[in-house]
Image (tube, helix red, strand yellow):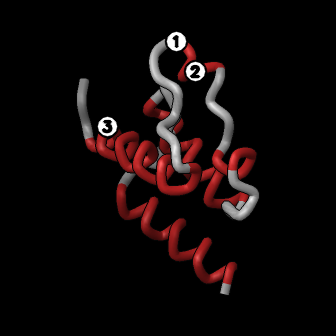
Amino acid sequence: PVDARTDLFSLGVVLYQMATGALPPRGAAFAVDQPPPSSINPAVPPALSDLVMRLLARDRDLRPPTAEAVADELRRIELALS
């Protein structure tokens, strides 16, 4: 069933593309051949790379539970970088 975590997956796709300049692999390759953003672009902070990968988890139960949780984590990443 579709729920709010589907939107979080879509956010993960957008963030992945912003961080790497490319869309994540699609289809069967998605689950096994998806390199983390920081491995493609070393300028991507590891914490942001980890968040993006969690947003892109095939199992939606492994994604952050809410958009608010994602926003909080993005704020923490930003603060850690400043």
Q: Quadrant of the C terminus?
A: bottom right
> Marks 1 and 3, Cα distance to the nearest angstrom?
18 Å
Task: Please state which of the two labelled residues, at mark 1 or mark 3, is closer to the viewer.
Answer: 1
Callout 3 amino acid:
Thr
Label pair 2/1, CB-CB below 8 angstroms: yes
Q: Position of residue 75 (x, y in %)?
A: 52, 75
| Figure quadrant of residue 69 | bottom left
Callout 2 amino acid:
Ala
Could you tell me which residue is drawn at 51 percent across and 34 percent down? 24
Q: Secondary structure at mark 3?
A: helix
Furthest residue in direction front, as rendered: 21
The tag on residue 42 is none
Q: Secondary structure at mark 2?
A: helix
Camera-side residue of 27 and 3: 27
Q: Position of residue 70 (x, y in %)?
A: 45, 60
Could you tell me which residue is drawn at 47 percent across and 38 percent down? 23
Could you tell me which residue is drawn at 37 percent across and 53 percent down? 66
Mark 1 closeness class: few <14, some 14–19, many ≥20 residues within 10 Å: few
Furthest residue in direction bottom, as rendered: 82
The tag on residue 6 is 3
Asked if residue 38 is positioned above or below residue 47 in the image, the reply reads above
Residue on which the image places disc 2: 31
Label pair 1/3, CB-CB below 8 angstroms: no
Residue on which the image places disc 1: 28
Q: Position of residue 52 (x, y in %)?
A: 55, 49
Of label 2 and label 3, which has the lower sequence position?
3
